[in-house]
Image (spheres, rainbow, N blue to C red):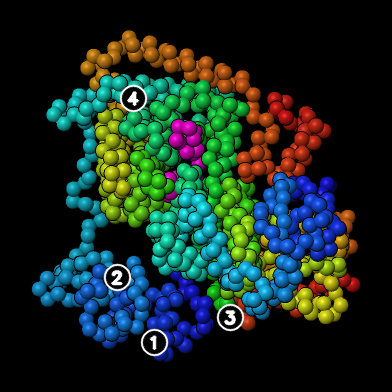
Amino acid sequence: MAMWITRPRNITHHLKTNIGFLEFFKYQRIWLRTSSYSNPLPSNLIAKNYGSTSPPLLRDWASFFTARRYKSENAAKQVVDEEKQALDFLGGSVTFTSDLEFISESPEKKVHCYRVLDDNGYPITSTRLPQVSNEITMKMYRDMVTLQIMDAIFYEAQRQGRICFYATTTGEEAVNIAPAAALTPHDVILPQYREPGVLLWRGFTLQEFANQLFANKEDYGKGRQMHVHYGSNKLNCFTMSAPIATQLPQAVGAAYSLKMEKKDACAVTFCGDGGTSEGDFHAALNFAAVMETPILFICRNNGWAISTPLSEQFRSDGIAVKGQAYGIRSTQVDGNDPLAVYTAVRAAREMAIVEQRPILIEALTYRVGHHSTSDDSTKYRPADEIEFWRNERNPVARFRKWIERNGWWSEKEDSQFRIEVRQQVMQAIQAAERIEKPPLSEMFTDVYDQTPSNLQEQEEMIREAIKRHPKDYPSDLPV
Amino acid sequence: MTVVFLGIGATAALTSANSFDSKKLHISSRRLVSETKSTFFVVRSDGRLNSGSNRRAQILITNAVATKADSSPATKPGHELLLFEALREGLEEEMERDARVCVMGEDVGHYGGSYKVTKDLANKYGDLRVLDTPIAENSFTGMAIGAAMTGLRPIIEGMNMGFLLLAFNQISNNCGMLHYTSGGQFTIPVVIRGPGGVGRQLGAEHSQRLESYFQSIPGIQMVACSTPYNAKGLMKAAIRSENPVILFEHVLLYNLKERIPDEEYVLNLEEAEMVRPGEHITILTYSRMRYHVMQAAKTLVNKGYDPEVIDIRSLKPFDLHTIGNSVKKTHRVLIVEECMRTGGIGASLTAAINENFHDYLDAPVVCLSSQDVPTPYAGTLEEWTVVQPAQIVTAVEQLCH
């Protein structure tokens, strides 16, 4: 960054005299490298850690200045410890070696992925099976089924032309519902856009989903945000914003707010594998680590970012390894195993709040559906790959086998439940279609807290235009 | 086209006041001659009230030429300080008043901020409320937005306004939008502030005028301060506002000294400031150019002209009420700004004035701006990119003939 010069313009003016230089140093930000001992910096300008071991020469300088608390400095103080062969740098003590080493670009052992149920719903090890209450287990399953059916029907509705856009979460039901199940209602959630399940778990009704999709006047967003970008302040889920990864630093801000107010809650934010390439991802993780905020970053690694596969997105061993680069504790879980995801998020939440630290969870899953209704994924990936994940690796079917085997659910109850949910979704769609659209005035409110005069004027202009040429405007527009 | 008023209800009484001071909106004329010092309160755009002291107008004229005020401490109440100290005072008062107010930015904590606006605040309020962030403008802006949506009232400091270009995504797509797209469920009461404008040889990247780029974003408000008095008042108003506000400071104005009142005052974000009432021509300006205009005004007065100088202060929305009254009186407008010729504040203001006050103009609106070039580093070249008092004098002479 720049050098800020607000006193005399010329830097050389200051470099002429030592005192002048150091005086100048007090007010400016200059990055200086000293490589020799002959011109050492005063001890007050060196990180606190090393004050006690400063040689006599530095202590003389120190007497010139008042002590200041500089957290990070700009020159190395070299203390060579003959016995340990270690160097003290500002980041800590570093052992040095005469053998040139490069850290490999990929770890020797790939990160292990945590799962507790296998593909057929059998527990992998009965001793370490997490204890999840029956109530939560059944609600998780029911919500996963609801999500599945809701997705299918809304997608069909788009194909029929009743709504203009939809994005399914097919294949990712577990990673939608299980994290929400592991959180409390006080935890603030900032989703990307493929996590309607978190809202569903918290009580967003099918009618409320439909209202947003039909952009009618009952929509909490008042018909302003694009489809699928739900939000509900009473359920503590922030309104989704379309640009990728912008919610990640915002989530750090929300976590910071919770930390300031010392609440027993954390912020939870989602992104996809594609979102991890955005600058905001890196900065958000860095910020969260530096500020020690209670936040969970849940990354749904579903293999595809529209048409971009993982190999073209990043070259690291998944996303969990990136956490360590920022000083963040991370883990990788099988995103299609609801019990594993639930357990991981539970544990992560505990650590985040008690230890006030960020946690990164990578959930491996697969995006069975297309990116959205504007996409046809068979164009860039083989159809049999999609079918494999839809059938053999289906998270809902897998979980169903587990609960049926435990005697908590039956096929009959399942088909009955599915019929009921279908009916509810259809009713919600029909009702939402009939509800009026938001009135024209809602176009101009909420831009600011109070509608300013220029917007009132613009509203008048449009009303007049509609009055004069009613045929040019939609007839069902409530004015 | 009807004239647009900013919703300030009881303004009929204003047109008579010659020494109109926009900080006082009087409903009854009795108060006009009052010299008594009263507590300042906020003038709200919905018409509720305000009053201030008449002396301000006189003090402002003499101070408006970037020289130190010769103050006689014995007679004048209030205290003297520099502009950056005024900003700090406003900030501190608001942090004291509301525990949800916090500051975030690079080096704002123990370093005290690159321009010392947050000096000692970290000592007083702690590391968490005055937060040092890593270097990622888009991300700490995003962080502030998230914190605001969760209930805090953050102030984001960009070390230089130009760096906030990196935060454009968060400011445009989220800050300005989320209140709207969430259907009013979430508010974003952030303040984004920082020094901008052409400094002394800071180079092109550090001399950006972001107000040009940001003015189009719906949902945000923009204000520019120019004196210690309005810096403190606008800072406080911005913090108390429920809307996101961008407060533009100028690198070269931080060391301006002025005497400001001891008692608390908050200014109206949407109001312009009458710097010098006049009859012949309306000169609209803001930030640093105010001082170039006042310098030119001295020359103009000697030549027999009587310019009316208005510091528009509110860049979004424009105070078309004050500006309109002035245009109706003088019938000539000169806009002096630091933005580039293309797409700057002056360009928008010219369009707004032409649309709204066309009938009252005797001459086309003239706008003096910087050229459409990146700001050069060489001192002489840099000086020529910025509008100088001599050019202002020439423009007024041409317009008034």
For image coordinates 12% across by 76% down, the residue present is A82
Q: Callout 2 environment at 10 Å: few (<14), some (14 to 19), or many (20+)?
A: many
The answer, for residue B136, to whether it is visible in the render is no
- Disc 3 vs disc 4: Cβ atoms closer than 8 Å? no
Instruction: Specify which label sits upstream in the sequence, 4 or 2.
Output: 2
Callout 4 secondary element: helix
Q: Taking B274 as reference, is B389 above or below it?
A: below
Image: magenta residue range: A232-254
Q: Amino acid at mark 3?
A: Ala
Residue picked out by circle 3: B378
For the residues carrying marks 1 and 3, which lies nearer the camera in this image?
1
Discs 4, 2 touching: Cβ within 8 Å:
no
Subunit ID for the residue under disc 4:
A
Instruction: Tell me where residue B310 appears, x and y as whole percent.
Output: 75, 64
Label 3 or label 4, whichever lies nearer to me, is: 4
Give x and y (percent) for residue B318.
71, 55
* Distance in Å between CA atoms under marks 1 and 3: 29 Å
The residue carrying mark 1 is: A19
Report helix, strand or loop for mark 1: helix
Query: In this view of the protein, which residue sits in the foreground, B224 or A218?
Result: B224
- In the displayed structure, A79 sits above or below A393; it is below
Report the amino acid beneath label 1.
Ile
Give the residue at mark 2. Answer: A47
Q: Overall secondary structure of the magenta stretch?
A: loop
x then y, percent, for residue A334: 27, 35
* Chain for disc number 1: A
| Callout 3 secondary element | loop
Residue in the image at 34% along x and 71% along y: A73
The residue at 48%/49% (across/down) is B100
Amino acid type at image mark 2: Ala
